[in-house]
């Protein structure tokens, strides 16, 4: 089974694995946001302007997002 990816604590994007495994995972869009593997609910948002989930998460661009991110 694949390792749980990181999610951004601010915009809820699911973050891709870094190309260099030694790099830390960081959100391109929120450089100061915490990231965590502690999240639930994988959603793919294709049409943010027509998605209730996108509105709830404040998502404005298509992508993969976590429904819930647990930041300490
Ligand atoms: Zn982010």
Image (cartoon, helix red, strand yellow):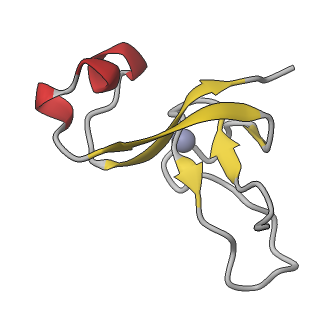
The residue lying toward the viewer, choosing from 59 and 67, is 67
Q: Residue pushed farthest bottom? A: 20
- In the displayed structure image, the side of residue 32 where residue 60 appears, left or right: left
Q: Which residue is painted at 76% across and 54% down in the image?
A: 4
The N terminus - image quarter: bottom right
Q: Residue pushed farthest left? A: 50
The residue lying toward the viewer, choosing from 1 and 26, is 1
Q: Which residue is painted at 79% across and 44% down in the image?
A: 37
- In the displayed structure image, the side of residue 7 where residue 45 appears, left or right: left
Q: Which residue is painted at 54% across and 35% down in the image?
A: 12
Q: Position of residue 9 (x, y in %)?
A: 66, 31
The C terminus - image quarter: top right
Quadrant of res 68: top right
Taking the image in four quarters, ligand 1 sits in the one at top right
Quadrant of res 20: bottom right
Q: Position of residue 24 (x, y in %)?
A: 81, 64
Q: Which residue is painted at 68% across and 70% down in the image?
A: 17
4 in relation to 41, above or below: below
Q: Position of residue 21 (x, y in %)?
A: 82, 80
């Amino acid at each position: 089974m694949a390792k749980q990816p990181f999610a951004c604590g601010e915009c809820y994007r699911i973050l891709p694995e870094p190309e260099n495994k030694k790099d830390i995972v960081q959100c391109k869009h929120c450089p100061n946001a915490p990231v965590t593997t502690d999240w639930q609910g994988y959603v793919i948002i294709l049409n943010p302007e027509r998605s209730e989930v996108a509105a709830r998460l404040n998502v404005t661009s298509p992508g993969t997002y976590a429904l819930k991110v647990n930041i300490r």
